[in-house]
Image (tube, rainbow, N blue to C red):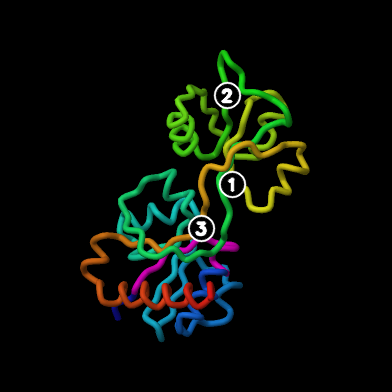
């Protein structure tokens, strides 16, 4: 049986993507959301799901261990992997922004920016013609301005509540973020008919949701 393998991030994106697949007419078992398995097969639809960390999804797709993936635009912009972007699923909306303490200017001598997204932050400040030192962090980025590690942070904002609770304000919006259906270029050629059909059905489901 020739399965179509899809890499999915765990959590909110996974739940919203499953709802979209169901809306597109795919019969998926209800217990999928609660499964602790890392690989889930749905033989009736000839689908196999790999459950991964969001940052790993494009890696699996680029290397061909997954034919398709669902990845946030933030991860795609940051990693610049060799994958095809097929459909904007319009789920898990948020945006990338700069933030810092209220009424503070960037340091003129050696401005520092803390972020989990060094490539996006570097590109943003480069386009503005500003030279900054990027400090890459993996934990709570909001801490950086509070403890004097950085003048600004570049991070994902969904409600803005985390910034507010930590006494930070948003300064500049960088880019809107939604999740995308991505494909491995070789898989797309070999399994073109099935992949195109899924992309079409998902696109129609997205348009129906928007209406």
Residue under numbered circle 2: 112
Q: Disc 2 or 3, which lies upstream in sequence?
A: 2
Above or below, 56 relative to 170: below
Q: Disc 3 or 1, which lies upstream in sequence?
A: 1
- Viewer-proximal residue among 1 and 113: 113
Q: Residue furthest front?
A: 211
* Image coords of residue 78 (percent x, y): 44, 43
Residue under numbered circle 1: 156
Q: Are marks 3 and 1 in contact (CB under 8 Å)?
A: no
* Image coords of residue 3 (percent x, y): 33, 76
Q: Quadrant of the N terminus?
A: bottom left
Check disc 2 and report its element: helix, strand or loop: strand
Above or below, 38 relative to 138: below
Q: Are marks 2 and 3 in contact (CB under 8 Å)?
A: no
Residue under numbered circle 3: 178
* Image coords of residue 177 (percent x, y): 52, 53
In three-dimensional space, the C-alpha distance between marks 3 and 1, rounded to whole angstroms, equals 11 Å
Crowd class of label 1 (few under 14; some 14 to 19; many from 20; radius 10 Å): many
Check disc 1 and report its element: helix, strand or loop: strand
Q: Disc 1 or 2, which lies upstream in sequence?
A: 2
Part of the protein shown in magenta = 4-15
Which residue does the image show at 53% across and 72% down from the upper left?
210
- Viewer-proximal residue among 211 and 190: 211
Above or below, 77 relative to 15: above
Which residue does the image show at 40% across and 78% down from the upper left?
201
């Amino acid at each position: 049986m020739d399965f179509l393998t899809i890499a999915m991030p765990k959590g909110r994106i996974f739940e919203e993507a499953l709802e979209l697949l169901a809306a597109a007419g795919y019969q998926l078992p209800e217990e999928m959301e609660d499964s602790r398995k890392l690989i889930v097969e749905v033989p009736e639809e000839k689908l196999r799901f790999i459950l991964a960390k969001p940052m790993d999804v494009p890696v699996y797709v680029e290397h061909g261990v997954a034919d398709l993936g669902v990845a946030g635009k933030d991860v795609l912009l940051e990693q610049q992997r060799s994958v095809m972007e097929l459909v904007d699923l319009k789920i898990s909306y948020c945006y990338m922004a700069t933030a810092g303490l209220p009424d503070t200017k960037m340091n003129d001598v050696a401005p520092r920016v803390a972020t989990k997204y060094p490539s996006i932050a570097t590109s943003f400040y480069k386009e503005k013609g500003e030279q900054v030192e990027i400090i890459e962090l993996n934990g709570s980025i909001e801490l950086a301005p509070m403890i004097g590690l950085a003048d600004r942070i570049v991070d994902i904002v969904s409600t803005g509540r985390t910034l507010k609770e930590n006494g930070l304000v948003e300064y500049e919006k960088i880019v809107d973020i939604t999740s995308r259906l991505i494909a491995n270029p070789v898989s797309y050629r070999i399994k073109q008919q099935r992949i195109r059909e899924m992309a079409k059905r998902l696109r129609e489901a997205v348009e129906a949701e928007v209406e």
